[in-house]
Image: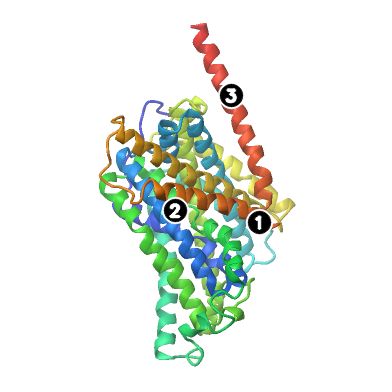
Amino acid sequence: MSQPGADLSRNLRNRHIQLIAIGGTIGVGLFLGSARAIHNAGPGLLLAYALGGVAIFFIMRALGELLTYRPVAGSFATYADEFCGPFAGFVTGWSYWFMWVVMAMAELTAIGIYVRYWFPQVPQWLPPLVALLALYGSNLLAVRVFGELEFWFALIKVATIVALIVAGLAVIVLHAGNLGATASFANLWAHGGFLPFGITGVLLTLQIVMFAYAGVELIGVTAGEAQDPAVALPRATNGIIARILIFYLGALLVIMAVVPWDQLSPSVSPFVFVFDKLGVPAAASIITVVVITAASSSCNSGLFSTGRMLWSLAQRGQAPRAFRALNPRHVPAAGIHVSAAFMLLTVILNYMVPKEVFTWVTSITLIGTLWTWGIIMLSHRNYRRAVQAGRAAAAPFRMPGAPFANWAVLGFLVVVSALLALDPDTRVALYVAPVWFAILGIGYYARSRRVSLADAAR
C-alpha cells in the first residue's frame, strides 16, 4: 500500500554515507577509461586528473554547504528551485534523472561486455537484464539494503586500488619481482617527457577525466535519508580531495611508474596489465570481477537516485503526483518502477547496436553531469547572496574562495563541454543536449500553462 503523505526514513548510517561517497568517486572510468586516457596524454594525465580534482573539490564543498543549510533528498534540484528559480529546479531534477538513467544503461552495458569475458557464447543483452532485475528488486526494499550493497561494492573497489598502490610501491622501492629492475618514478618523464603530447593531450582527456568523476555528487541525494546529516555529510564531503589524491592520482602515478606509459595498451585496463606483470594469478579475471562490481554499484546508485529525484520533483509539483507515494518501507517505489523501465532500453540497444551503445550513452551522460555540477555552483553563489541579504540562514560548513571559485569552476565546465566537439565519439552528446533541453522547455511551459488554467478556474 502506498503512503502519499509519508516521508523518507533516515536509515543511512555514517559508514554507509562514507562508503557511498567513496563509491561515487571510483567507477568504471578509472578501471577502464584510464587506459585510453593514458594513451592520449601520457603522464600528463595526472595533470588532467589534478585539474579536474580541484574543480570537484570546490563543487563538493559548495554542495556540502548547501546540504548543511538544508539536508533534503532533492538536494541540488531543490536548491536550484529555491535560489535559481522553478525552471532551473525543473531542468536540474529531470536532467539528473535522465543522466542517471543513461549512466545506468552504460554500466549495464559494461556488465554485458565483461561477463562475456568468461562466457563468450552468452548474448550481450542477457547479463544486463539479469543485473537490472536483481538491483531493481533490492532497491524496492528498505534504504538500508541500498546502503549495505553500496558499502560492500565500494569496499571491493577500495581494496583493489589499495592493493595495487601497495604492491606497486613495493616494486618501486624494493626493486622486487620482474618489474623491479625498470620500475621507477623516473618513468613519469623518461619516455617523451611528462607532457609527450603537450597541453593539448591533457585538454583532450578532460572529458574522460570528468566522466570518471561522475557520480561524486550522489551523497547529496542521500541527505534526506542520512541518520545524522549534520555530521556525516560534511565529513564525507571533506574526504573528497583525499580520495581523489589517493585513489586516482595515487593509483595512476604508481601504474605509470611501475610500467612506462607507452607500454600500456589503450584497449586493456592498466590494472589488468600491472597486476598481470606483477605475477598476480588470474589478474584479468580479478579486475573483471571488480569492473562488474563497479558497474553494478553505479546502476544500483542510479536506481536509488532516480527514484528519489522523481519523488522530490513530485513534491514540488514538477512531476506526476503518482511519484509522491512511498511504499510501506518508505521507499519511492513508483519512481524506481519507471526508472527501471527506461533502463530496460539497455537490453534493446545491446541487442540492436552492441558495439556503439557504450560510447553513445557515456557521452550523453556527461552533459547531464556537467549541468548538475554547474547548477550546484550557481545555486551556491545565489545562496551566499541570500545569506548576505538575510533571506537564508548561514550554514556552519562553508566553501572557501567564493565567489571567485564559483565562476572559475563554471568556466572550467564550459571548456570541458566545448572540448566534447573535438572528439567524434563524444560529439553525439552535443547533438542530444539541445534536443533534451528543448523537450524540458516545452514540458515546463505546458506544466506552467496547465497550472495557470487550473488556478484561473478556481
Question: Residue at 58% of width from left, 24% of height from top?
Answer: 445
In this orientation, does residue 281 appear?
no
Can you say whether 405 is above or below 47 in the image?
A: above
Residue 238 in the image, given as x and y percentages of width and height: 32, 56
The label number, if any, that marks residue 389 in the structure image: none
Q: CA distance from mark 2 to mark 3?
A: 31 Å
Question: x and y percent of residue 310 in the render?
Answer: 49, 35
Name the one closer to the observer, 326 or 103. 103
Q: Nearer the viewer, mark 2 or mark 3?
A: 3
Query: Which is in the foreground here, disc 3 or disc 1?
Result: 3
Circle 1 SS class: helix
In terms of secondary structure, where does tag 3 sit? helix
| Mark identifier at residue 445 | 3
The quarter of the rendered structure image containing the N terminus is top left
Q: Residues within 10 Å of mark 2 (few under 14, many from 20)?
A: many
Vertical arrangement, residue 287 with respect to residue 85, above or below: below
Can you give x and y, in whole percent of width and height, for residue 255 in the image? 50, 77
Q: Earlier in the sequence, mark 2 or mark 3?
A: 2
Amino acid carrying label 3: it is Tyr
Displayed quadrant of residue 285:
bottom right
**Count of numbered circles in the view:** 3
Given residues 265 and 65, the one toward you in this image is 65
Q: Which mark is residue 359?
A: 1
**Looking at the picture, does residue 179 appear above or below residue 95?**
below
Name the residue beneath numbered marker 2: 216
- Furthest residue toward right: 352
Q: CA distance from mark 3 to mark 1?
A: 32 Å
Circle 1 Cα neighbour tier, 10 Å, few/some/many (<14 / 14–19 / ≥20): few
Q: Identify the residue at image location x=44%, y=35%.
A: 80
Most extreme residue toward the bottom, as rendered? 181
